[in-house]
């Protein structure tokens, strides 16, 4: 069968290569067992790329990143590179990918698996069946706004400042991504901002509300103040389906929502660019939320499920292969139901498993479900 999906795999540092090697096993399985083949290229990013090439990502890798259908990344960074000049720090590789490919929409699902319900610090009845998606604007807002800096007032008082800034097209494009996603899920979207105290918040509300009324009248749309959203997420998270918000509030709310699930080794993410009107394609990068976990790197202890669920997200959002994505997600549930656990999600009565044992169990579950 001819290769029909092109992927760039960037395992990165620390546990990145270990968890991505389990993803490779699933890719190989799909090549053999499903109606799809992947043309995979490998590359370096982060500290390992700095050690090899003196930069956190090379121009050659960036050129490949621009041509492939999707990018899968492990994680970057670690204490080994703490003294590397800022522009070459491992994170600079990830930031360049996000910036050069204009990956403005960050998707962070928070799903509570039944088998892991006790991992949440919230009561089971509050989180059972939780499945929400936070859509965070990733390339603008206060993290990038100018002017920014530290200066001194005429009376000698020092001050620091940043600028929260959003253009109309920036708000419109992230809103449309969120509405489209809501339309494919449960038709519910909440937009979070601080319209009560911020000009940019009031503007955000006005633009998103206009798109809701004009383009998506069938979606149940609500505005919510970001601080109330933070409270509602712990009070009654199941009231939400999709939440769209800016870069700063999205940073906080997506971490908060993630912790409703209680397990960092289980959390996938996607960062999407704009759809090219000619080709219909969009740049997309998929990665686990966790970092390089230097404390357990190289020991076959890392939980590979966040990376495998990121791969499933890729099937859904880049390739419209919802059935195959569901096969992987259900197989993840099978593995958890079998009682196997890596250290991060271990609890009494379960069996401690290595990274590769989880990979073995997942392939066995895929075999069973695809039989
Ligand atoms: P981390 O996510 O790497 O680790 C936090 C804790 O969770 C550690 O105890 C770790 O062992 C555990 N953990 C994380 N992922 C796990 C997994 N898959 N399986 C089992 N346990 C897991 O965060 P940190 O310790 O703050 O950061 C370590 C390094 O990773 C830093 O250099 C940081 O900059 C980098 N980092 C990178 C990314 C990224 O590449 N996107 C994200 C976060 C942190």
Image (cartoon, rainbow, N blue to C red):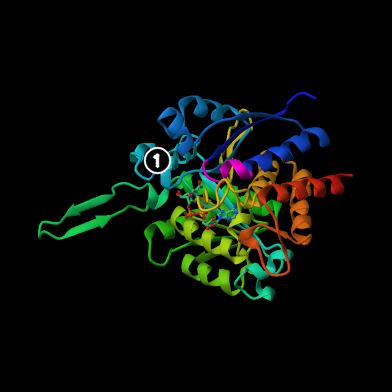
Residue 116 lies, in percent from the top left, at 69, 65
Q: Nearer the viewer, residue 87 or 53?
A: 53
Q: Mark 1 points at which residue?
A: 89
Q: Residue 115 placed where, x, y %? A: 73, 64
Is 194 in front, or is 92? 92
Residue 71 drawn at (x, y percent): 59, 36
Horizontal relation, residue 336 to residue 104: left or right? right
Which residues fall within the magenta stretch? 13-19
Tell which of 301 and 154 is nearer to you. 301
> Which residue is located at x 64 percent, y 67 percent?
119
Which quadrant of the figure contains the C terminus? top right
Q: Is residue 87 left or right of residue 113?
A: left
Residue 267: say if magenta.
no
Query: What residue is shown at x 43% (from left), y 63% (from top)?
Result: 195
Q: Residue at x 52, y 33 (%)?
A: 44
Q: Can residue 315 be seen in this view?
A: yes
- Furthest-right residue in view? 371
């Amino acid at each position: 069968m001819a290769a029909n999906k092109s992927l760039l795999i960037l395992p990165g540092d620390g546990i990145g290569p270990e968890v991505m090697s389990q993803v490779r096993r699933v890719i190989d399985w799909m090549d053999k067992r499903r109606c799809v083949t992947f043309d995979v290229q490998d590359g370096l990013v982060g500290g390992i790329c700095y050690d090899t090439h003196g930069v956190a990502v090379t121009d050659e890798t960036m050129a490949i990143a621009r041509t492939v259908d999707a990018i899968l990344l492990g994680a970057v960074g670690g204490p080994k590179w703490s003294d590397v000049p800022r522009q070459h720090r491992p994170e600079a590789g990830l930031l360049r990918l996000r910036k050069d490919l204009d990956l403005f929409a960050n998707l962070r699902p928070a799903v509570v698996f039944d088998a892991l319900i006790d991992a949440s610090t919230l009561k089971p009845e509050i989180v059972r069946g939780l499945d929400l998606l936070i859509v965070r604007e990733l390339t603008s807002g206060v993290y990038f706004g100018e002017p920014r800096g530290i200066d001194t007032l005429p009376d000698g008082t020092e001050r620091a400042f940043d600028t929260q800034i959003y253009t109309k097209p920036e708000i419109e494009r992230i809103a449309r991504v969120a509405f489209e996603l809501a339309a494919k899920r449960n038709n519910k979207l909440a937009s979070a901002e601080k319209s009560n105290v911020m000009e940019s918040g009031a503007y955000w509300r006005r633009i998103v509300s206009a798109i809701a009324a004009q383009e998506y009248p069938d979606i149940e749309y609500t505005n919510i103040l970001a601080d109330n959203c933070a409270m509602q997420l712990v009070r009654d998270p199941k009231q939400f389906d999709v939440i769209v918000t800016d870069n700063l509030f999205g940073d906080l709310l997506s971490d908060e929502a993630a912790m409703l699930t209680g397990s960092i080794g289980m959390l996938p993410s996607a960062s999407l660019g704009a759809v090219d009107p000619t080709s219909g394609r969009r740049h997309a990068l998929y990665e686990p939320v966790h970092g390089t976990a230097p404390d357990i790197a190289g020991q076959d202890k890392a939980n590979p499920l966040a990376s495998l669920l990121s791969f499933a997200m890729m099937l859904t959002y880049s390739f419209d292969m919802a059935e195959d994505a569901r096969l992987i997600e259900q197989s993840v549930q099978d593995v958890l139901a079998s009682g196997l656990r890596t250290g991060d999600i271990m609890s009494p009565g379960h069996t401690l498993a290595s990274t590769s044992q989880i990979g073995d169990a997942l392939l066995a579950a895929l075999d069973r479900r695809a039989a």
